[in-house]
Image: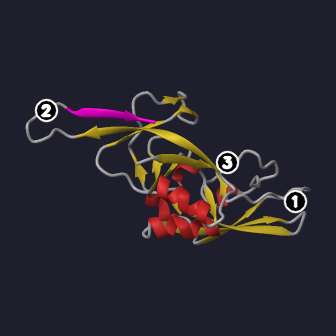
Amino acid sequence: MEYFRIRQDSRYLFTPVFSNPGEVMQRRKSVSLENADRIQDVSVLFADSPHLLDFPDILDRQFFLVSMEAKKVFAMYEPSMIFKNVCILNNERDEYGQYALPLFRELDCLAEGSEVSLDRTYIKRLRIQQQGGLDSIFKVAGLMTDVVIIRLDVAESLLRRGIRRFALERVEVEMVKKEDRRGKEDVRNHSR
């Protein structure tokens, strides 16, 4: 199966920059399933700007947020995923955007050959390993930034519904098979 990293489209120049992110959660790393009860069901983030803001379907600079249309697709593929609602206000231009803050299941799947900065905030090359099944949407564990991975069918579903304001990067997947019944060594196949 093919997987992609989904992220904010860098072609949008005037995306929201929040002045009050601490009102949602003090640290970005704390936005997790374990802290779901500590995150309000509805939050307001202020992004005052003299420019009209771009509201793409994926925001990932301060928090990983998805548009309400993308939320519907995510919920179709991961029905048990928890979402918190976020309203982004630009009081200078009297505009707003509605988003959802998904709380992803985090999988420890970072494979050898990935190139990660020492502080684990920047990924130069991403490889994941798959032993058994991976979720259709998940976050890579052990990183200080949100690296959200979606399966090919999720990406296709987003595109079929006209949700296009995001970027996709193909992820290298290393298939790891457990020992078979005859006791052979692990078999590793590499795909791009």
Q: Are marks 2 and 3 in contact (CB under 8 Å)?
A: no
| Amino acid on which disc 1 is placed | Leu
Most extreme residue toward the left is 182
Q: Mark 1 or mark 2, which has the lower sequence index? A: 1
Residue mark closest to the camera, 3 vs 1? 1
Q: Any magenta on residue 30? A: no
Residue at image position (13%, 32%) is 184
- Label 1 Cα neighbours within 10 Å, binned few <14 / some 14-19 / many ≥20: some
Give the residue number, with chain letter if any, for mark 2.
Answer: 184
Give the residue number, with chain letter if any, for mark 3.
Answer: 61
Quarter of the image where one finds residue 39: bottom right
Segment colored magenta: 186-192
Secondary structure at badge 2 equals: loop
| Residue 146 rendering spot, x and y as whole percentages | 55, 47
Give the residue number, with chain letter if any, for mark 1.
Answer: 52
Between the C-alphas of marks 3 and 1, the distance is 18 Å
| Amino acid on which disc 3 is placed | Arg
Between the C-alphas of marks 1 and 2, the distance is 61 Å
- Label 2 Cα neighbours within 10 Å, binned few <14 / some 14-19 / many ≥20: few
